[in-house]
Protein backbone atom coordinates (compact mmCIF):
# COMPACT_ATOMS: atom_id res chain seq x y z
CA UNK A 1 0.00 0.00 0.00
CA UNK A 2 1.36 3.40 -0.98
CA UNK A 3 0.88 6.38 1.31
CA UNK A 4 -0.25 9.39 -0.66
CA UNK A 5 -0.22 12.75 1.05
CA UNK A 6 -2.91 15.07 -0.23
CA UNK A 7 -1.61 18.28 -1.83
CA UNK A 8 -3.40 20.49 0.71
CA UNK A 9 -1.62 18.74 3.58
CA UNK A 10 1.78 19.21 1.93
CA UNK A 11 1.01 22.91 1.45
CA UNK A 12 0.04 23.22 5.12
CA UNK A 13 3.27 21.50 6.12
CA UNK A 14 5.28 24.00 4.07
CA UNK A 15 3.44 26.90 5.71
CA UNK A 16 4.08 25.38 9.12
CA UNK A 17 7.77 24.88 8.31
CA UNK A 18 8.02 28.52 7.16
CA UNK A 19 6.27 29.72 10.32
CA UNK A 20 8.66 27.67 12.47
CA UNK A 21 11.66 29.09 10.60
CA UNK A 22 10.33 32.64 11.03
CA UNK A 23 9.83 32.04 14.74
CA UNK A 24 13.33 30.57 15.02
CA UNK A 25 14.82 33.60 13.24
CA UNK A 26 12.87 35.98 15.50
CA UNK A 27 14.00 34.23 18.69
CA UNK A 28 17.58 34.14 17.44
CA UNK A 29 17.52 37.86 16.61
CA UNK A 30 16.12 38.69 20.04
CA UNK A 31 18.65 36.48 21.82
CA UNK A 32 21.58 37.83 19.80
CA UNK A 33 20.49 41.40 20.55
CA UNK A 34 20.48 40.73 24.27
CA UNK A 35 23.70 38.75 24.15
CA UNK A 36 25.42 41.57 22.23
CA UNK A 37 24.62 43.90 25.14
CA UNK A 38 26.10 41.36 27.55
CA UNK A 39 29.17 40.96 25.33
CA UNK A 40 29.66 44.74 25.29
CA UNK A 41 29.44 44.82 29.08
CA UNK A 42 31.95 41.98 29.29
CA UNK A 43 34.27 43.82 26.92
CA UNK A 44 33.98 46.98 29.05
CA UNK A 45 35.17 45.02 32.06
CA UNK A 46 38.18 43.82 30.08
CA UNK A 47 39.50 47.31 29.37
CA UNK A 48 43.19 47.82 29.81
CA UNK A 49 44.39 50.21 32.50
CA UNK A 50 47.93 51.56 32.48
CA UNK A 51 49.88 51.86 35.72
CA UNK A 52 52.22 54.82 36.11
CA UNK A 53 54.50 56.16 38.82
CA UNK A 54 54.79 59.90 39.23
CA UNK A 55 58.16 61.11 40.43
CA UNK A 56 59.56 64.42 41.64
CA UNK A 57 63.27 64.97 42.10
CA UNK A 58 63.95 61.26 41.66
CA UNK A 59 61.53 60.37 44.45
CA UNK A 60 58.36 58.39 43.76
CA UNK A 61 55.31 60.38 44.79
CA UNK A 62 52.43 58.14 43.84
CA UNK A 63 51.22 55.35 41.58
CA UNK A 64 48.04 55.65 39.57
CA UNK A 65 46.01 53.89 36.90
CA UNK A 66 45.04 55.62 33.67
CA UNK A 67 43.06 54.66 30.57
CA UNK A 68 45.64 56.57 28.53
CA UNK A 69 48.37 54.37 27.07
CA UNK A 70 52.03 55.46 26.97
CA UNK A 71 51.70 55.95 23.20
CA UNK A 72 48.72 58.23 23.72
CA UNK A 73 50.77 60.30 26.17
CA UNK A 74 53.30 60.79 23.38
CA UNK A 75 55.77 58.03 24.14
CA UNK A 76 58.54 57.58 26.67
CA UNK A 77 60.04 61.02 26.21
CA UNK A 78 56.68 62.71 26.86
CA UNK A 79 56.30 60.66 30.03
CA UNK A 80 59.77 61.72 31.19
CA UNK A 81 58.85 65.38 30.65
CA UNK A 82 55.83 64.82 32.89
CA UNK A 83 58.02 63.05 35.49
CA UNK A 84 56.09 59.83 34.94
CA UNK A 85 57.26 56.26 34.55
CA UNK A 86 55.17 53.53 32.89
CA UNK A 87 55.00 50.43 35.12
CA UNK A 88 52.74 48.11 33.14
CA UNK A 89 49.35 47.44 31.62
CA UNK A 90 46.63 45.63 33.56
CA UNK A 91 43.18 44.34 32.74
CA UNK A 92 40.24 44.38 35.16
CA UNK A 93 38.71 40.90 35.14
CA UNK A 94 35.09 39.89 35.71
CA UNK A 95 35.78 38.91 39.32
CA UNK A 96 37.26 42.38 40.00
CA UNK A 97 40.85 41.11 40.07
CA UNK A 98 43.68 42.52 37.97
CA UNK A 99 45.67 40.62 35.34
CA UNK A 100 48.87 41.90 33.82
CA UNK A 101 48.46 42.59 30.10
CA UNK A 102 50.81 40.53 27.98
CA UNK A 103 53.35 42.63 26.09
CA UNK A 104 52.58 40.88 22.79
CA UNK A 105 48.79 40.96 23.31
CA UNK A 106 47.17 43.93 21.61
CA UNK A 107 45.60 46.16 24.29
CA UNK A 108 42.60 46.90 22.09
CA UNK A 109 42.10 43.36 20.77
CA UNK A 110 38.46 42.85 19.95
CA UNK A 111 37.22 39.96 22.05
CA UNK A 112 33.65 41.04 21.34
CA UNK A 113 33.89 39.49 17.86
CA UNK A 114 35.13 36.22 19.34
CA UNK A 115 32.38 36.19 21.96
CA UNK A 116 29.69 36.91 19.38
CA UNK A 117 31.07 34.14 17.16
CA UNK A 118 30.75 31.69 20.04
CA UNK A 119 27.23 32.94 20.73
CA UNK A 120 26.29 32.45 17.07
CA UNK A 121 27.59 28.86 17.13
CA UNK A 122 25.51 28.22 20.22
CA UNK A 123 22.34 29.64 18.67
CA UNK A 124 22.54 27.84 15.32
CA UNK A 125 20.58 24.63 15.80
CA UNK A 126 22.12 21.39 14.68
CA UNK A 127 19.70 19.74 12.29
CA UNK A 128 19.68 16.11 11.22
CA UNK A 129 21.54 15.61 7.96
CA UNK A 130 18.40 14.57 6.07
CA UNK A 131 16.52 17.80 6.88
CA UNK A 132 17.04 20.66 4.42
CA UNK A 133 18.02 24.03 5.94
Image (cartoon, rainbow, N blue to C red):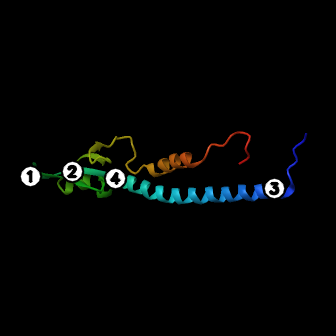
Tell me the crowding category of disc 2: few under 14, some 14 to 19, or many 20 or more residues within 10 angstroms, Cα based. many
Tag 4 near tag 3, CB within 8 Å:
no
Report x, y in % for residue 90: 29, 46
Q: Is residue 17 left or right of residue 58?
A: right
Residue denoted by label 2: 52
Instruction: Report the Cα–Cα distance between label 4 and label 3.
Output: 53 Å
**What SS does tag 2 mark?**
strand
Mark closest to the chain's N terminus, 4 or 1: 4
Tell us which disc is closer to us: 1 or 2.
2
The answer to whether 68 is drawn above or below residue 97 in the figure is below
- Asked if the residue under mark 1 is in contact with the one under mark 3, i.e. CB atoms within 8 Å, the reply is no
Residue carrying label 3: 9
The alpha-carbon separation of the residues under discs 3 and 2 comes to 73 Å
Q: Which mark is residue 57?
A: 1
At label 3, counting other C-alpha atoms closer than 10 Å, the crowd grade (few under 14, some 14-19, many 20 or more) is few
Residue linked to disc 4: 45
Measured in 3D between alpha carbons, the distance from the residue under mark 3 to the one under mark 1, in whole angstroms, is: 88 Å
Amino acid sequence: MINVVPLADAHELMELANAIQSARDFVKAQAVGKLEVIAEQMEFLRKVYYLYRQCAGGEALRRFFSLISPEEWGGERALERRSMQFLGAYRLEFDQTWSRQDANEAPNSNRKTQILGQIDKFLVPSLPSDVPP
